[in-house]
Image (cartoon, rainbow, N blue to C red):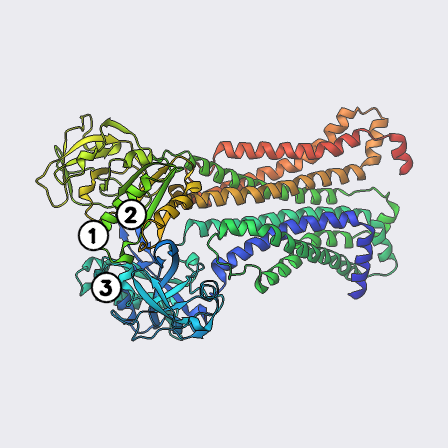
């Protein structure tokens, strides 16, 4: 083996161009797979840091039938729902609550946001985690009215508390309470989620920071997630039935008997592997498969290069056989060469993953904390494994073909004799490259068209110059009236900020929570039933429509005179007007809203439709009322700026934050940023499929060029004879092009069949485009054949210039 390695290295030193081509090709394929494995490892495979026996942990999901939807599955439940599972006993050894949240830290100009996770006292012991400093909270502290204590993350302790042991006992003003730091979590610990918090608080003691007091006992407030550790010997698939029985039994004894329809499902603790995983996770999984196709394209290309090299080495192989080398010995030598090339490609692939992988991780894992490393020993082991596999896949066919050389026939033949079997094998490998490339490019086209379709949707509002401002009024212990007054003060302050065009306060905003209540309409016995649900309303100030860029298409909007409690007026959306009063003038019609079913709320205007929750949602029955109808209190301040919202956000935040020394953190986000997560899965698919598809196309183009060039090189004598007998250069070019492009055309045909299967598999991730979209299929086929034609034309032109005398003399 050592002798074979030395011989291979000497051979590589004599052919540096060949080695460079192989290593670069494999590096691109292996680097793409290393990067995607790192992402998928973090999302799906890697156990949470510092967690003991993570395979015994499960995450609970709650599923029930939903009209028009089928089964609705969610990861959240109420505190009473959690308690029913906690008290279920077997098969659970322990059950804990996890509730991620964002809270305010500090007051006034020094206020900051802090990521907080509310957990039960058994959370840390259940995970088997030990503190880096201090201790975790106890059962006595995790109760309503218990002592307010906090555990901070290692990163927060170092960055905000100076990494000082004296930080233990220091108070933190979180929300409206003061919490004493009693412990520091170990470095790198993020709990059971990727985006770890800065602070952990006991859920019962901190209940009033996150939810109203009624959330302690009501099943209507489904706001907590549940994780559990299975008892030894219990299996996940068997634990769901007793958990469901305990949940339903407790629901039957409560005021929410409808909760008896819930089924408890148990999944892995990694949220991306659960039944309610996001489309981002599903797209990431598909992209991982796409990276595998890129590696197959690279391996097929390298196999073709090795076959071409084998043709040049036929005399060497024949002489080795003639001198007594066994075929097994020869096969080992050739495989050692391909495996060494695979390892070299893997080493270069690691460099590709380090250099370009950061861009991919930023796209696929934007919330990944700095403490979580993607490139670790697992990724290195994976890279080593696929490097050897790639070397084996690329080298096995050429090695078998070369080791079967016929000694006498090879020594008698000319140096450029090529058998039909070799030509067919190389053409088949080229067709495979093209087929995989077609699949990737069709996937890119489908996601790109989906993204374009979504981005071209009319949201009914302008999101590029709108900021949304929210204040945690619970953090300053304000009653409803005082909270509303705070928002109105911020409204006046916002109007005075330079660069602010319009401002309005509301009871809610687009792409946030929506509210519905009892509603009747004059002249209608009932309201239309839409898949998007019941009519929803919002209470707003007069500038709401102008701030969002909405048009009043009929009648008028609200005026300052509509603010008083005696003003009973409404503005309805276009869909509301068209469906509730078809063919009639909605102006002057009456709505009977909420508990007061006797007072006519008169429609004074019709506003253009606006998306409320989802950018791809269907028609929604929406209407707007003056601020006096803000039954749930004011929650949002909307600001329209003269410059792009992202550019103005920092200045607006500073101006509002400094307006009150007792103000908690003022959160200022762009409405465009609220929409962006809904587009992420399409952007991810379009970007990554396109990147890997173009990479595969480049490799395939090199493959077409290489196969055609080597074929021309081997057929130089034949081409010289043809030209000597009168063949025209145009005919020679046509001959070579036909051979080069025919394999690409066959691969494209096979690839289209694979692309149709891919389209059907990812149909749920597409929008507004059919899986067999003829424009995408036709464009990809035409583009690939054009690239193949160009790649084959260069060696074909060289073939047409062959001098027959020189060709025959060389032979």
Give the number of marks. 3
**Residue picked out by circle 3:** 216
Q: CA separation, marks 1 and 2?
A: 18 Å
The quarter of the displayed image where residue 246 is located: bottom left
Q: Residue at x 82, y 35 (%)?
A: 716
Q: Is residue 349 above or below residue 430?
A: below
Q: Secondary structure at mark 3?
A: helix
Q: Residue at x 83, y 27 (%)?
A: 723
Left or right placement of residue 151 versus residue 607 in this view: right
**Residue picked out by circle 1:** 480
Name the quarter where the N terminus is drawn.
bottom right
Q: Is residue 555 above or below residue 9?
A: above
Picture coordinates of residue 60 (x, y %)? 35, 62
Q: Is residue 690 above or below residue 42?
A: above
Badge 1 or badge 3: first in the primary sequence: 3
Q: Residue at x 91, y 35 (%)?
A: 809
Left or right placement of residue 586 versus residue 358 in this view: left
Q: Nearer the viewer, mark 1 or mark 2?
A: 1
Badge 1 or badge 2: first in the primary sequence: 1
Q: Secondary structure at mark 2?
A: loop
């Amino acid at each position: 083996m050592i002798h074979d390695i030395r011989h291979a290295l000497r051979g590589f030193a004599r052919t540096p161009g060949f080695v460079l081509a192989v290593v670069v090709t494999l590096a691109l394929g292996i680097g793409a797979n290393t990067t995607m494995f790192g992402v998928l490892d973090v999302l799906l495979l890697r156990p949470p840091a510092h967690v003991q026996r993570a395979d015994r942990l499960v995450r609970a999901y709650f599923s029930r039938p939903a009209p028009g939807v089928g089964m609705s599955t969610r990861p959240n439940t109420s505190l009473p729902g959690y308690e029913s599972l906690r008290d279920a006993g077997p098969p659970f050894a322990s059950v804990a609550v996890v509730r991620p949240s964002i809270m305010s830290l500090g007051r006034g100009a020094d206020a900051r946001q802090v990521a907080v996770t509310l957990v039960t006292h058994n959370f840390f012991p259940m995970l088997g985690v030990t503190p880096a400093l201090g201790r975790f909270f106890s059962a006595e502290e995790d109760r309503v009215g218990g002592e307010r204590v906090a555990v901070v993350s290692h990163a927060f302790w170092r960055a905000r508390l100076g990494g000082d042991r004296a930080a233990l006992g220091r108070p933190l003003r979180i929300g409206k309470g003061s919490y004493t730091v009693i412990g520091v979590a170990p470095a790198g610990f993020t709990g059971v989620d990727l985006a770890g918090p800065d602070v952990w608080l006991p859920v019962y003691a901190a209940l009033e920071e996150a939810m109203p007091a009624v959330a302690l006992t009501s099943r209507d407030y489904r706001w907590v997630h549940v994780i559990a550790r299975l008892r030894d010997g219990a299996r996940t698939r068997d634990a769901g039935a007793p958990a469901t029985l305990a949940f339903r039994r407790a629901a039957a004894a409560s005021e929410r008997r409808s909760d008896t329809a819930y089924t408890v499902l148990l999944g892995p603790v990694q949220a991306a592997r659960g039944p309610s995983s996001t489309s981002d996770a599903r797209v990431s999984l598909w992209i991982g498969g796409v990276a595998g196709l890129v590696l197959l394209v690279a391996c097929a290309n390298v196999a073709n290069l090795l076959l071409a090299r084998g043709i040049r080495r036929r005399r060497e192989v024949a002489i080795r056989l003639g001198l007594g080398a066994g075929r097994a010995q020869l096969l080992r030598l050739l495989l050692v060469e391909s495996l060494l090339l695979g390892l070299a490609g893997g080493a270069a692939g690691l460099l590709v993953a380090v250099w370009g992988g950061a861009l991919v991780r930023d796209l696929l894992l934007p919330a990944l904390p700095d403490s979580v490393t993607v490139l670790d020993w697992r990724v290195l082991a994976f890279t080593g494994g696929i490097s050897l596999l790639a070397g084996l896949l690329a080298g096995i066919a050429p090695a078998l073909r070369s080791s079967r050389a016929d000694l006498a026939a090879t020594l008698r033949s000319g140096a450029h004799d090529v058998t039909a079997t070799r030509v067919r094998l190389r053409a088949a490998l080229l067709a495979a490259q093209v087929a995989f490339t077609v699949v990737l490019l069709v996937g890119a086209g489908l996601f790109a068209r989906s993204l374009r379709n979504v981005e071209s949707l009319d949201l009914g509002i302008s999101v590029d110059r709108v900021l949304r401002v929210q204040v945690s009024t619970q953090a300053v212990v304000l009653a409803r009236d005082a909270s509303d007054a705070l928002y109105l003060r911020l409204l006046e302050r916002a109007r005075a900020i330079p660069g602010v065009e319009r401002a309005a306060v509301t009871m809610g905003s687009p792409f946030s929570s929506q509210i519905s209540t009892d509603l009747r309409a004059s002249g209608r016995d009932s309201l239309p039933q839409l898949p998007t649900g019941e009519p929803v309303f919002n209470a707003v100030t007069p500038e709401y429509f102008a701030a969002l860029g909405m048009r009043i298409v009929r009648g008028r909007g609200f005026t300052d005179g509509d603010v008083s409690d005696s003003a009973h007026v409404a503005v309805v959306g276009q869909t509301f007007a068209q469906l509730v009063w078809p063919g009639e003038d909605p102006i002057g019609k009456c709505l009977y809203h909420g508990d007061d079913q006797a007072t006519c709320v008169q429609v004074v205007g019709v506003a253009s439709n606006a998306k409320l929750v989802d950018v791809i949602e269907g028609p929604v029955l929406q209407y707007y009322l003056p601020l006096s109808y803000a039954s749930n209190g004011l929650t949002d301040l909307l600001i329209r700026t003269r410059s792009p919202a992202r550019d103005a956000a920092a200045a607006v935040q500073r101006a509002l934050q400094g307006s009150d020394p007792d103000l908690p953190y003022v959160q200022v986000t762009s409405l465009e940023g609220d929409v962006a997560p809904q587009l992420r899965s399409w952007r991810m698919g379009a970007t990554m499929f396109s990147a890997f598809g173009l990479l595969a196309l480049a490799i395939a183009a090199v493959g077409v060029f290489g196969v055609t060039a080597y074929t021309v090189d081997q057929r130089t004598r034949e081409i010289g004879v043809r030209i000597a007998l009168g063949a025209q250069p145009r005919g020679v070019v046509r001959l070579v092009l036909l051979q080069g492009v025919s394999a690409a055309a066959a691969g494209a045909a096979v690839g289209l069949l694979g692309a149709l299967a891919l389209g059907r598999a990812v149909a749920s991730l597409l929008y507004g485009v059919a899986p067999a979209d003829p424009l995408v299929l036709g464009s990809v086929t035409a583009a690939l054949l054009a690239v193949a034609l160009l790649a084959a034309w260069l060696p074909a032109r060289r073939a047409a210039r062959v001098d027959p005398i020189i060709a025959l003399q060389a032979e």
